[in-house]
Amino acid sequence: MAFARTKTYTLDAARAAIQRYCAFQERCHSEVADRLFAMGVLPEAQAELVFELMNDGYLSEERFARAYARGKFRIKGWGPRKIAQGLQAKRVSSACIAVGLQELDEAELRAYLLRKKEAFAGEQEFVQWCLRKGYDRGTALEAFRSED
């Protein structure tokens, strides 16, 4: 049995709902488009609403990429590769991905890896963990072999 929508939205109601959705936290274009589709908004109205959200400052892919990169690094400890893959999965443009990755400070990344290396017994175990977290092999080896 197919999904049946129980609520229909007028254009004004959809506008108010999607503004609340975007005001709650940073969103990317694909999340907003998926939400509008789930709400049953017509494609022509979706484009209009997305344009209005961008003009009113509710929606900015660059701002989203910056917030995503900062959050994933500080909360989950993700490295640059994993953050870039996450942004690609959300269909963020490559220019915005580059802007988002600029938020990562090399000194912070290094300090994070130096703190985490204490939990690992061997070099290979630490490097494998770093690769899973989205760091490159060279950075992981440099952090492990560092005397800091």
Image: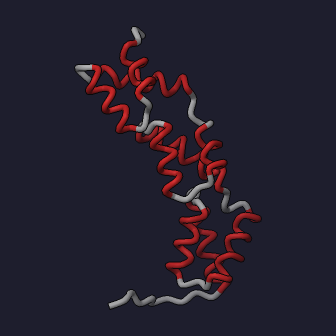
Q: In the image, is residue 125 above or below residue 79?
A: above
User: For the image shown, how many numbered marks are present on the structure?
Assistant: 0
Q: Is residue 62 left or right of residue 39?
A: right
Q: Position of residue 7 (x, y in %)?
A: 49, 88
In which quadrant is the N terminus drawn?
bottom left
Q: In the image, is residue 6 above or below residue 108?
A: below
The residue positioned farthest toward the front in the image shown: 137
In which quadrant is the C terminus drawn?
top left
Q: Position of residue 5 (x, y in %)?
A: 45, 88
Q: Residue at left 58%, top 87%?
A: 9
The residue positioned farthest toward the top in the image shown: 147
Of residues 108 and 91, the one drawn nearer to the viewer in this rendering: 91
Q: Position of residue 85 (x, y in %)?
A: 48, 48
Of residues 140 and 105, the one drawn nearer to the viewer in this rendering: 140
Of residues 82 and 5, the one drawn nearer to the viewer in this rendering: 82
| Residue 93 location, quadrant | bottom right
Q: Is residue 122 left or right of residue 88?
A: left
Name the colouring of the figure.
Answer: secondary structure
Q: Position of residue 81 (x, y in %)?
A: 48, 40
